[in-house]
Image (cartoon, rainbow, N blue to C red):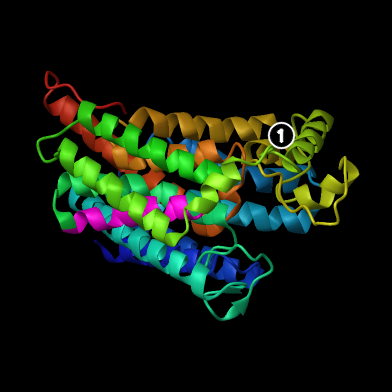
Amino acid sequence: MCRSGAILFLLAACATGAIWTPDPLIAWAFEIGIFGVVTVQCLRYAGRLPRGALLWLGIGVWGFAQLVLGATVYRYATLNAALRNLALSATALGAFLAFSKPASRAAFLSWFSWFGAVVSAIGVFAYWTSPGRILWLVPASYPDNWGPFPSRNNFAQFLELCFPAALYELSRKPRWLEAIPPVLMLGAGIASSSRAGAAILVGEAAASVLLMRRGLGANLQLPSRWSAVVLAFLAAAVAALAGGDRLIRRFAEPDPFAGRREIFHATEAMIASRPWSGFGLGTFAAVYPQYAEFDDGASVEQAHSDWLEWSAEGGLPYAALWAGLAACIARRTRSCPWSFGVLAAFVHALVDYPFARFGISIWAFLLAGLSAGEAIEVEKNLARWPLTGGGNL
């Protein structure tokens, strides 16, 4: 892995470790680091950009356009959100430039797989040994925290992103050592008792195997049926030991959308008020009380649906940019099965807010940049050998 790639990986890992803190100074430090690394990369690059770059650019500059046009009700919040989005867009571009070679992408996926395994183990261990605290040290405002993650859903969303990469690494290097990360991730995700997260992780396992079976290369091997059974059993054992029975109780709850349904309705009313311009990125918490249908005493900071929040804050055209990014990733999943986690995050974003957490969304944009590099590699191979076929671009 090149130096700039290693720095991007380290910044993303540190952002995940600091995901619990709302301190804007921490966020600005990560953003400045990303801008610096990517600026140096751009000065050295003379090739063409991938097709998805326009989507990255649109997402990155939307908030600044709102500031220029006065289409925000809270300029400071919009400025912060715009800087975060620009940093995410720069992350995708930086990943595309830093991991342009197959060997560097392979190194990233291996690192990401093992990083996810370590975070999985720490998350479960911290949950049981430091209740009410983040990593044994910092008092938490929410009791259900997992390692550095302030909620079970955030923990599961991170696992959704790295789980397909771990499965891909296992197929690329079918050894029992490589089975450790996916077993830990699946078991920890089920133990987290995030209903959407657990369902998505199980769906990812099936979908990733199907994708790898259809787009199987000479260097990939799917595990045998007995090996798959053993791996599933081990993941279930990890989940049971870590407390996966709570997931069953949560699925048994009569109304899984209690509380959220009212937030969704209020957010839909916000969208209807300003469908094209939105209220300004980052302004949801400030505007929501005007449209709230109930008050249970809790502060509502997010819409609990990134898709609704994007539409309310940036307008329907802004949400369309995110939909375009999701479609772009979907087209590449056959040739890049490890990017399936980004699609999973977009699905989870229907009922939660993974992309509002920088320590989660930065990995999604890193994978988006990697998949763009893989797509150009496939395109070059098709041009060189047009009769051999290839994956979707």
Magenta includes 185? yes
Examine the rendered structure and indicate whether residue 246 appears above or below residue 28: above
Q: Position of residue 46 (x, y in %)?
A: 31, 47
Asked whether residue 363 appears in the rendered view, the answer is: no
Q: Quadrant of the C terminus?
A: top left
Q: Position of residue 307 (x, y in %)?
A: 63, 36
Under circle 1, the secondary element is: loop
Q: Residues within 10 Å of mark 1 (few under 14, many from 20)?
A: many
Residue depicted at 46% across the width and 55% down the height: 191
Give the left or right position of residue 108, taking residue 277 as reference.
left
Q: Quadrant of the rendered structure where residue 391 is?
A: top left
Q: Position of residue 83 (x, y in %)?
A: 61, 56
Q: Quadrant of the N terminus?
A: bottom left
> As rendered, which of 292 and 242 lies closer to the eye?
242
Asked whether residue 391 appears in the rendered view, the answer is: yes
Give the left or right position of residue 117, taking residue 89 as reference.
left
Residue depicted at 47% across the width and 53% down the height: 244
> As rendered, which of 127 and 249 lies closer to the eye?
249
Examine the rendered structure and indicate whether residue 285 appears above or below residue 5: above
Q: Main secondary structure of the magenta part?
A: helix
Give the left or right position of residue 195, taking residue 65 as reference.
left
Q: Position of residue 252 (x, y in %)?
A: 60, 40
Residue depicted at 54% across the width and 75% down the height: 130
Examine the rendered structure and indicate whether residue 210 appears above or below residue 295: above
Name the residue at the top extreme: 387
Magenta includes 103? no
Q: Amino acid at mark 1?
A: Gly
Magenta region, residue range: 177-192
User: Which residue in the protein does label 1 denote?
Assistant: 315
Name the residue at the right extreme: 290
Examine the rendered structure and indicate whether residue 229 appears above or below residue 190: above
Q: Quadrant of the rendered structure where residue 256 is?
A: top right
